[in-house]
Amino acid sequence: QSVLTQPPSVSATPGQKVTISCSGSSSNIGTNYVSWYQQLPGTAPKLLIYDNDKRPSGIPDRFSGSKSGTSATLGITGLQTGDEADYYCGTWDSNLSGVFGTGTKVTVL
Amino acid sequence: QVQLQESGPGLVKPSETLSLTCTVSGASISSTSYYWGWIRQPPGQGLEWIGSIYYSGSTYNNPSLKSRVTMSVDTSKNQFSLKVTSVIAADTAVYFCARHGSGSWFVWDYWGQGTLVTVSS
């Protein structure tokens, strides 16, 4: 029932680039900052990107974020086997509710 | 090093109340810079925000759960808690406690490891 839509899965070979889209509306992505989280199997999510395009300390610059209108995108370059995980976008909705995306599984072929 | 740790029963009977506590170390729950919150993840599914609480007790709750959710904070113990009443099987999930900024709104920078709560008789 998430209001933020992501592709269920993306895949690529090591070293390649993948992008993950997060589609929302004017009441959430269109108005507020987007953050991105990486969830490795069996672990808690980890903050990758905040305020649309900022990386916390310790996050490599292979990870990037952008936002345009009511959509946001996470990019991963130089794909590594350790990047295999689920990725979620998140933002605030103007109806006073936090929302996460449906999640995208990244597979390294 | 900020750390959060969830604790509480792993099994709750249908119609009863789910109660969890999150103990924070390495940071003060009384900080004016942060909110503290709960997020859950049903098995094999995505993340769902439950709610956030400020040290003062001010809360924001997911409208879809609002009537069943109560959150509280105990600054003396550096803990915050979650109660979900009248639980059903669909409340079975891994429950995470986490922190987000009062300025960097809904940016969750520290998370607990999560605790699985199963609703079953």
Image (cartoon, rainbow, N blue to C red):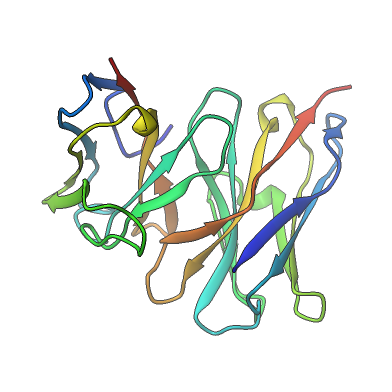
- Residue at 24% across, 52% down: A29
Q: Position of residue A25 (x, y in %)?
A: 22, 46
Horizontal relation, residue B41 to residue B120: left or right: left
Query: Residue A105, located in which quarter of the rendered image?
Result: top left
Q: Residue furthest left?
A: A68
Q: Nearer the viewer, residue A20 or B18?
A: A20
Q: Position of residue B89 (x, y in %)?
A: 73, 25
Quadrant of the snapshot with the N terminus of chain B: bottom right
- Residue at 50% across, 39% down: B47
Quadrant of the snapshot with the C terminus of chain B: top right
Q: Relative to A93, does residue B16 appear above or below in the rendering?
A: above
Query: Residue B85, located in which quarter of the rendered image?
Result: top right
Residue A103 appears anywhere in the view: no
Q: Nearer the viewer, residue A5 or A54?
A: A54
Q: Position of residue A88 (x, y in %)?
A: 37, 40
- Residue at 63% across, 76% down: B27
Q: Nearer the viewer, residue A46 or A90?
A: A46
Q: Relative to A102, does residue B2 appear above or below in the rendering?
A: below
Q: Nearer the viewer, residue B71 or B110?
A: B110
Residue A65 appears anywhere in the view: yes
